[in-house]
Image: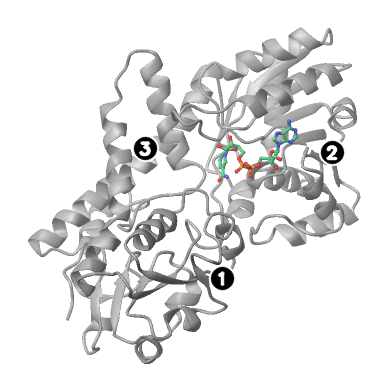
Amino acid sequence: MKLAVIGTGYVGLVSGVCFSELGNEVICVDNAASKIELLNNGEVPIHEPGLKELIASNTAAGRLSFTTDLAAAVSSSEIIIIAVGTPSLPDGKANLAYIEQAAEEIGRAIDDYKVVVVKSTVPVGTNEKVADIIRNHSVASFDFASVPEFLREGTAVRDTLNPDRIIIGTASDRAAELLTELHRPLTDQITITDVRSSEMIKYASNAFLATKISFINEIANICEKVGADVEEVAKGMGMDRRIGSSFLKAGIGYGGSCFPKDTQALIQIAGQMDYDFKLLKSVVEVNRDQRFNVIRKLDDLLGDVAGRTIGIWGLAFKPETDDVRDAPAFEIIEALLERGAQIKAYDPIASNNFEKIFKRSEVQYCESAQEAAQDADALCILTEWKEFIDIPLTDIQKWLKTPNLIDGRNIYKEEDLEATPFAYYSIGRPKMN
Ligand code: NAD
């Protein structure tokens, strides 16, 4: 099949590349000329394991190309997939400006029957608005469908090639048939539903996962007070198939480009219909507060952080990604700087993106984990990169000025710490030493 994918971010680029891997002819479009130039030079603007190799093989096979020319890409494709960003507006609503702009451009370019798919995460009713915009600019016939994306950054290629399910929301049999054929090589778990339910499935899924995370984080906070171990509690809970073990990892809360904005957007969607989504509001509040656990624990260890050097390991919102959007590290570092601490930070790949917000004059960006820990008064682990897990505690002890360790992701087992001099705080487990 011939596809145009509009937007070459984490979702559009990965989807486009994976569809080409299945044998389709894919043109990826972006209005950021610098991204297209990079891609045409064989470079990849984002970090996703396995992506670079697939781009190289599929461009070499002539199935994958990149352009800024949306009109030409639309005109030569049967299926148009919109995967542009829908970031939060200051009031929490989804910003639909990019979607609307893409819809207008598609409308002007359509010259023959097409299926237009919205893959971006959009509030209920947006697909219908997109269809109206296209209709206002075109006389050609088209059908539209909502096919939300569920990939996770860091495992995006694997998730796209092995999805748990594909949701196709459309009122058109022709579009349903074409999109089922497109996705069939990926999975048999394909559900056809109405457009509005499909849009809601995406928000409800992310809100539920965020709820699981905030739930286990609150259990963790209670565990600390009653002397229980949240790792044991989560393991015991997860053995119940009705609960499931995923997303029961206590830590410093969720971040990234999806959960924070999608939970806020769903609260707004409900509010616009005069529904007060109390549960989800609490989930968001618990998540924000959970980040500051790190500060409270530092205060407990150091008394006052003013003038102290704090080593930070991990800036990305999770491992295997360079995405720092809404990463917990932002608020933690901001609070530490406000209190007069000096920050030495290291992330294997996300420092450049982080530096766009906190300049080198504010944060010392280090070239290695050792450099960030060297002579620091305390070390905080904010992202569970494997690189950190592999470093022996004896090395960390040698590097630090004082052996104060705050493990915001519970990467160590308690027995690892028993015979060490570390004053060790983790999440949802008693303080050690
Ligand atoms: P992103 O910001 O990484 O990429 C969006 C891209 O769209 C950018 O490269 C931008 O230049 C381009 N763009 C914007 N307007 C354009 C236009 N008119 N024409 C051409 N290109 C245009 O965003 P993302 O993380 O890939 O997310 C895209 C959507 O998918 C969002 O709605 C997001 O909520 C959703 N989503 C994201 C993830 C994720 O993990 N990142 C997972 C599931 C769903």
Residue 288 drawn at (x, y percent): 32, 46
Residue 35 drawn at (x, y percent): 77, 49
Picture quarter with ligand 1: top right
- Which badge, 1 or 3, comes first in the chain's sequence? 3
In the visual, does 91 lie left or right of 293?
Answer: right
Tag count: 3
Q: Is the CB–ligand 1 distance for label 1 below 8 Å?
A: no
Residue type for callout 3: Phe
Local SS, label 1? loop
In the rendered image, the residue lying farthest to the left is 226
Q: Is the CB–ligand 1 distance for label 2 below 8 Å?
A: yes
**Is 31 located above or below residue 306 in the figure?**
above
Q: Please tell me whether mark 3 or mark 2 is closer to you in this view.
A: 2
Q: Given contact means CB atoms under 8 Å apart, are the residues at marks 3 and 2 in contact?
A: no
Mark 3 surroundings within 10 Å by alpha-carbon count, few (fewer than 14), some (14 through 19), many (20 or more): some
Local SS, label 3? helix
Mark 1 surroundings within 10 Å by alpha-carbon count, few (fewer than 14), some (14 through 19), many (20 or more): many
Q: Which residue in the structure is indicated by mark 1?
A: 348
Local SS, label 2? loop
- Which quadrant does the N terminus fall into? top right
Q: Quadrant of residue 71?
A: top right
In the visual, does 66 lie left or right of 150?
Answer: right
Q: Residue at x 62, y 36 (%)?
A: 85
Residue 21's disc is none
Q: Which residue in the structure is indicated by mark 3?
A: 208
Residue 10 drawn at (x, y percent): 64, 47
